[in-house]
Image (tube, grey):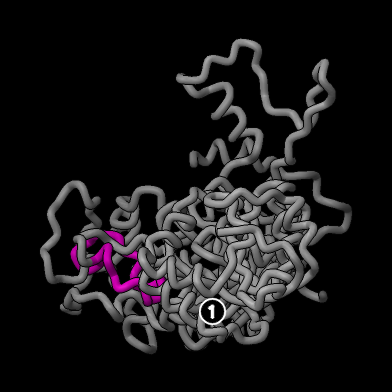
Amino acid sequence: MGANAGGAGSNGRLKVAKYWASSCGGCDISLLEIGPHLLELIEAADVVFWPCAADFKYQDVAAYPDGYIDVCLFNGGVRSSEQEEIARLLRRKSKTMVAYGACAIDGGIPALANLSTVDEMKAASYHQSPSTPNEGRVEPALRTETPFGDLELPALYPQVLRLSDVVEVDYLIPGCPPQSHQVWKVLQAVVAGAVPARNDAVAVGCDDKVVCDECPREKRKTRIKEFVRPHLKAPEPDWCLLEQGFVCMGPATRSGCGAPCLKANLGCRGCYTAPAGVSDRGTAMIGAIGSLLDATTEERAQEMVGRIVDPVGTFYRFSLASSMLKGRR
Amino acid sequence: MAEQQVRERTEPAAAPAGWEPRIIAFLCYWCSYTGADNAGTSRLKYPANVDIIRLMCSGRIDPELIMTAFARGADGVMVCGCHIGDCHYLTGNHKTMARMPLVRQVLADLGIERERFVHEWVSAAEGEKFARLVRQVTEQVRSVGPLNWPQRMRERGVGHGMDLKSWGE
């Protein structure tokens, strides 16, 4: 993967960039998961920026002409001033901006931090954590004076934002991480030169229905008798997990992943984005559960749902930043 | 999140002078809306703080509508439907009944005081109950002050797109 900073399309090959913002790195791994196809990709395209795998600097990107990058795969939400700056820079330099993975699209797991304030998080990380000795009560500061000059750190934002809160996004590739077969399907289109003109955050690399649609388990049209946590009971293999009382985000999650969690006896965690027509995943799930509860009084319903541990963290596990309320007050 | 912690973190800012709570009431067509109508034809007085949205059934009240109301600037939300056993569609309100405890839990976890969300059954004959309920809800929402969700989120850098637009924008 060589640097090709010589000007727009100087060698006629596609220019691809990948960036990580507020994310774990799993999305970068998922790109490697396409395996031997990676060679086909590299044959057709130059990687011009990929902090995880290639040694390009921010200055290199800033030096590219605007619109130099054909496709930018951006994973991670936006939590700091650095991430916003790079998101804006990459948007300017890219013809097509793709929000890659749950975090860039919906905030993902990091957006669960929207349930806490920055001060609460700093207290937990720097002062309350038993494994962090911090007698001087030091906290990261935006600017630190040292004998060698001032050092600066990016500012932490009060909330995790989606990529689309900051820049215009053309496509979404959902998943935590996106499944490799879907990634390759999208990249094939890129390699084939079929990168269509700008779109308004169209989800690709997935289908339009819900996970239940491709789940192999049978719906027996029974109601939920009691919620069970997955470590307390072995589920019956071929029966809908939700009907058995295991929380499963399938009804509120877009299809396309192939339901691998369900095939492994685990309820859907909801990483593929919202199905078409749904804007708040958590309430979609509350709606679905409400229709399935075997309760004839409100007290009984209360008692049953009281067994669901951390409803916000479960129903908005990947989507708090794109929920209606965006986070805690 | 313990109610106490929610309180500590969300200690209401002093309400600006002249502030009036804005409450959205989702009422079902067959019982509760008729009940509200009954309050009107019986010439019962209740505060004008409530904006009524009529739906065919309380089972149609997707919890998303409740979140949307708060996200766009409501200070309180009421959900009313037929009493259990009276649903025009037989079991629509059973679904409402099963959904509301989770809605209440999620709202509490997101820092919205329990005073702001009320779910109550109101029959077509209970105009008096509806008027009393609106009076009570208006007072309890007034006691916790303005919610100001759209402004709050905008201050944190969120607020692009339609989903956090408040009325009149």
Position of A79 with respect to A271 (left or right) is right
Please indicate whether residue A242 sits to the left or right of residue A156 in the image: left
Q: Judge whether residue B2 can be spotted in this image.
A: yes
Name the residue that disc number 1 marks.
Answer: A190
User: Residue at 65% of width from left, 33% of height from top?
Assistant: A119
Q: Is residue B134 above or below residue A155?
A: below
**Looking at the image, is A119 positioned above or below residue A70?**
above
Question: Which amino acid, mark 1?
Answer: Val
Of A124 and B79, the residue lying toward us: A124
**Residue A206: percent from left, percent from top:** 43, 77
Tell which subunit mark 1 falls on. A
Rendered residue at 69%/46% (across/down): A80
Give the image location of residue B62, x and y in percent.
49, 75
Which residue occupies the extreme front position in the image? A11
Q: What percent of the width, then of the height, locates residue A71?
A: 62, 72
Which percent across, then down, holds residue A187? 48, 75
Picture residue at 77% right of the left edge, 74% below the top: B167
Residue density around tag 1, few if under 14, some if 14–19, many if 20 or more, within 10 Å: some
Left or right, residue A288 beside residue B130: left
Q: Is residue A254 magenta?
A: yes
User: Which region of the structure is painted magenta?
Assistant: A242-262
Residue B123 in sight here = no
Label 1: state its secondary structure: helix
| Residue in the foreground of this view, choosing between A231 and B48 | A231
